[in-house]
Amino acid sequence: MKNRLGVIVATMVAVWWSSAGGQTINGPARRSLGAGGFRIERLNPALDAIVSADAQLELLGDRFALTEGPVWVPEGTNGYLLFSDNAANVIYKWARGKPLSVFLEKSGYTGSDVTSVGAQTVAGRVPIILIGSNGLALDPQGRLVVTAMNDRTVYRLEKDGTRTILADRYDGKRFNGPNDIVVASTGRIYFTDSVWGLRGAEKDPNRELPFSGFFLIEPVEGTLSRPPIRLLGSDEGAPGTFPNGITLSPDETKLYVTAGARRTMRYDILPDGGIANGRLFVEHGSDGMRVDRRGNLYTTSGGTPGVVQITSPDGVPLGRLHLPQPTTEPRPRVCATNVAFGDADDRGLYITACTHLFKIRLKEPGVRPAASQNSELRTPK
């Protein structure tokens, strides 16, 4: 009886440690995820200044459906992470030493009928519908800005918990499904729009915009009118180049946008916020991305197997973080959808990975675009 009680207690502790933010993926813990463990691939000696060869991957949570859009929110001397679960239709809040909690319900779809909304994908072996929020960002005032794929809007969460719609149409036509987002220190909002907000994707009869594109929302304060929206680029006439991930260089003079699978473009940003001189930057990147303070770009693979690639500002691939690929049943899906820098020193790299959430500590601090140091958010009622 005593031995059985010990096993039960040990199991309860292990489950709490995994969900509360805590399991290091090395040694015995790696074996629990199956044969495919975490691996750092060094492509260039410059990687050594960014990540230690023996850096450990930390499992912060699992059993999600599809995690996306992480953003770090400073609070006091540290802070917490917000991230979307695109199928659960919530934004979760993760903080060290505290239980995972729901920060916002109905984060991407505020309706009640899900029979005809949201594109379909899988979480491991389980078919799921993508109805929740996707990209999250803070504006210079510390307010949360959200891409709501199935409401087909971009909205701002005010400090009192109300939502202000910033964009829902371009040229009178509804967006297909706002996807990723980044906010500049000027308050300008750059976001991508994809077909994943529609059940039938590009063939959905409710589709109004005939292309996927990336857009600029101009900052407007103190007015009830919608802010101006500009189309910066699209995949119209260029099949397979649909935009998804988007981010800014540290000095906000460059805009990075993915162009289909395994291609990331870089554009010069003009004084009016527009772009010019688009060119292929690196043959990697399918989903969300961020930069560190030296301008290195962290791109994600999107689907499985989950890979985060680090590329120098000159376009030289420096290395890759290969996420563990479980082989146990029921089979989860560990991909790499997005990344965000956090912790008090901005050296924590948080990785949303479909059914999982990971973190790795780096040597080089990252950039939190437009992040305010006084951006404490109140959990909406």
Image (cartoon, rainbow, N blue to C red):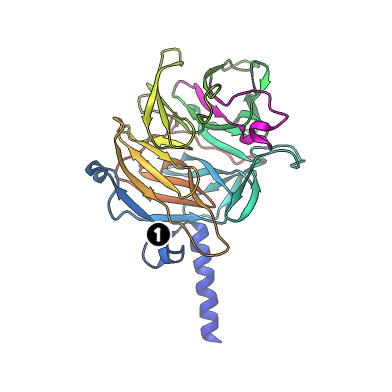
The C terminus lies in quadrant: top right
From the top left corner, tell me how far across and down residue 319 is, in percent. Answer: 31, 44
Q: Residue furthest left?
A: 45
- For the residue marked with disc 1, what is the amino acid? Gly
The N terminus lies in quadrant: bottom right
The residue under the point 40% across, 37% down is 284
From the top left corner, tell me how far across and down residue 24 is, in percent. Answer: 40, 60
Look at the image and give the residue range highlighted in magenta. Answer: 186-215
Q: Viewer-proximal residue, 54 or 91?
A: 54
Is 379 placed left or right of 249 in the picture?
A: right
From the top left corner, tell me how far across and down residue 173 is, in percent. Answer: 67, 20
Q: In this rendering, is residue 148 above or below 333?
A: above
Residue 366 lies in the magenta stretch? no
Residue 239 in sight: yes
Q: Residue furthest bottom?
A: 1
Residue 191 lies in the magenta stretch? yes
From the top left corner, tell me how far across and down residue 174 is, in percent. Answer: 67, 24
What residue would you read off at disc 1? 37
